[in-house]
Amino acid sequence: MDLNQKRVILRYELLGILFISLLGGALHFTFELSGYNPIVGAFSAVNESVWEHLKLGVWPIILYTIIEYVLIKKQTNNFFLAKTAAAYSIILVIPAIFYGYTSITEESIFAIDILSFIIAVIIGQVLSYELLTYKQLPKIAEVVSLIALAVLAVLFVVFTFYPPHIELFQDSVTGEYGIIKHLH
């Protein structure tokens, strides 16, 4: 891979930080703005649980993956591995920061939550860039990654409606789980 290809990929990954962050911020409000439409809820935060806030990073990454697939996939290596790694990094970084700092403060701090989201997005995009510009790995890595990304997408939809009753899925404001309270 030559330097020009790496520059193009770097520009897209940096633009992705902005795209994912802004769209993720918007998705925090779209469920309520839609009049609690359950289809919108599958892709938006439907409550104040940590799990629902992970959607705010993952769905924009998936959308940006589709955009990049059309625009730069042929110039990259390990495309689906890179994008899946970015999505899964969101799932690791946000809860790690959230549960880490709240174990000390014993309360959620909005500014830290926003900062943790942005940090997670940046880590995901840096990881994505590194994998996109790394030597081509065996095709099986792409296949497994695409399956892992699809599984993640399905889990976000399913757990919106049928969340496990554990802390990760519990609304920190109401104590309830999932979208069900809005469907009555």
Image (cartoon, helix red, strand yellow):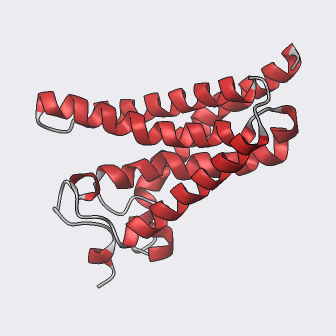
Residue 176 image offset from top left, x and y in percent: 20, 66
Q: Quadrant of the C terminus?
A: bottom left
| Residue sitting at the far top | 3
**What residue is drawn where x is 87% and y is 18%?**
4
Q: Is residue 33 visible?
A: no
Residue 130 image offset from top left, x and y in percent: 67, 23
Nearer to us in this view, 32 or 170: 170
**What residue is drawn where x is 45% and y is 60%?**
44
Q: Is residue 101 left or right of residue 15?
A: left
Q: Is residue 51 left or right of residue 83?
A: left
Above or below 182: residue 69? above
Q: Is residue 55 left or right of residue 83?
A: left
Above or below 76: residue 53? below
Q: Quadrant of the N terminus?
A: top right
Nearer to us in this view, 11 or 170: 170
| Residue sitting at the far left | 106
| Residue 101 in which image quadrant | top left
**What residue is drawn where x is 81% and y is 25%?**
8
Q: Is residue 3 visible?
A: yes
**What residue is drawn where x is 60% and y is 25%?**
126
| Residue sitting at the far bottom | 184
Residue 117 image offset from top left, x and y in percent: 42, 36
Residue 115 image offset from top left, x and y in percent: 38, 30
| Residue 31 in which image quadrant | bottom left
Q: How many numbered marks have been drawn onto this rendered protein structure?
A: 0
Above or below 27: residue 6? above
